[in-house]
Image (cartoon, rainbow, N blue to C red):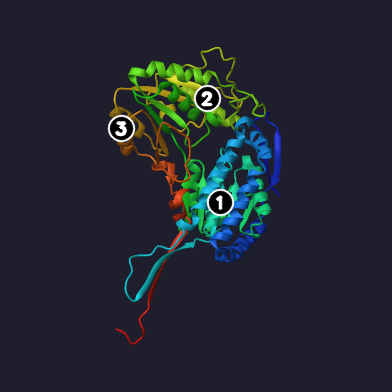
Amino acid sequence: MSRISIITPVDGSTYATRPVCTDDRLDQAILDARNAQTEWAAASIADRAAACTAFVDAMVSMTDDVVTELAWQMGRPVRFGAGEIGGFAERGHHMISIAEQSLAPVTPDPMEGFERWIAHEPLGLILVVAPWNYPLLTAVNSIVPALMAGNAVVLKHASQTLLAGERLQQAADTAGLPAGVFTNLVLSHQQVGRVLSDNLFDRVNFTGSVEAGRTIERAAAGTFTDVGLELGGKDPAYVRADADLDFAAANIADGAFFNSGQSCCGIERVYVDRSIFDDFVDAMVAEGRALTLGDPTDAHTTLGPMVTARAADGVRTQLDQAVAAGARPLVSTGDSGWSSTTGSPYLPPEILIDVDHTMPVMTEETFGPIVGVMPVDSDDEAVALMNDSTYGLSASIWTADAVAARSIGARLQTGTVFMNRADYLDPALAWTGVKDTGRGITLSSLGYAMLTRAKSYHLRLATPGDK
């Protein structure tokens, strides 16, 4: 029997090992989920809401244990771990609260002698493939609304965060969700490909890299399985001359460096009005130098390791390429006491200037605590540079002028436009992207449309003798 081990970025040791699900167990779990879904779909929305609320609350009750486990599995400092649980609860409770309205039948204008409506029917069986970087936040985006819509869910969590999947199963069991309605399985990539190519699911919601998303699409090709993909990002920030400089610098630094930069909607490139460029850079460098890189299980640590040494080395390569092409690093020149060692997951933050779009650090996903900052001379130049990307998840505009933000936002090729904030998912708004960032929607009432199918009812009430 093959096994998957979690190698912790804290010290490189094996943190946990789990057996991969057998093919027989996988096939039986899918059959059980299909059977359970029929009865679950017949339950009232109120009953589903009660069970899903208990599921969310059970997850929250495990906060202390989960925070420590996340630090060991993927390196996020324990001082920030509770934030993910809080976000899990916020999103879960919001999607539960809007389910009845979002799933209510759509009724057209009355027509004499007829009853007509459009029902939202559950798709059936949903496969959720969750990533390691936000192992609970990304999962809840799909799991709770899928369940509320009357679907059954099978979860395949990332190999690096298998314990997060186990915690979600524990929460479902504690909440009393019917057996088979939610099932966490330890699966190989080959098994995921097989169940998709065999058309065993009605939809797959995948969060991960662009290349892995292409693999998911290839596996589902020809099956007509719905595919939802949240993939890469290279999210920009634009700081206008009228922005609150200190506020912008602090929040953009947080958006760039939080979670060691391992966020699909983290800020990876910054464009600043030339008139405030030097002052902004100085303020952002101060924020970077204030971070404490170290053991994520230490409460004083504010920047933990990246998830693996290989991931950190990939970011180092991008950094070295930029410096060789003329970019200037600013944080590492300070008296930080940090070193950047090849083969280590511990990577200090870095801010680069004298960068341009010939450098991969400004055009390719970095997914690490490195950010490039460029001066611009106009809104038009900023928009052109922000749109010069194969990705489009979110973009932030830092300004005191909301009218200008709306105008600029309308020209940006992105799924979400922020003003004076970044790296945040509002569950009342659609979470979506354009270009290579993927397709589909999670969260908001529109997220429910991705998890249901329309079924029209057209009832003629006239008697057979009527014409």
Q: Residues within 10 Å of mark 3 (few under 14, many from 20)?
A: some
Disc 2 and disc 1 in contact, CB within 8 angstroms: no
Left or right? Give the position of 399 relative to 78. Answer: left
**Secondary-structure class at tag 2:** helix
Given residues 179 and 97, the one toward you in this image is 97
Quadrant of the rendered image containing residue 415: top left
Location of residue 83 by image quarter:
top right
For discs 2 and 1, the disc positioned in front in the rendered view: 1
For residue 459, the mark is none
Do labels 2 and 3 touch, CB within 8 Å? no
Q: Which residue is mark 3?
A: 404
Image coordinates for residue 439, horizontal then vertical, percent: 43, 47
Amino acid tagged 2: Arg
Estimate the x, y position of residue 86 in percent, counting from the top left. 58, 40
Real-space Cα separation, disc 2 to disc 1, in angstroms? 35 Å
Instruction: Out of 283 and 318, give the one closest to the viewer.
Output: 283
- Identify the mark at residue 143; answer none if there is no mark: 1
The crowd level at tag 2 (other Cα within 10 Å; few <14, some 14-19, many 20+) is some
Q: Position of residue 239 (x, y in %)?
A: 37, 26
Where does label 2 land, which residue? Answer: 316
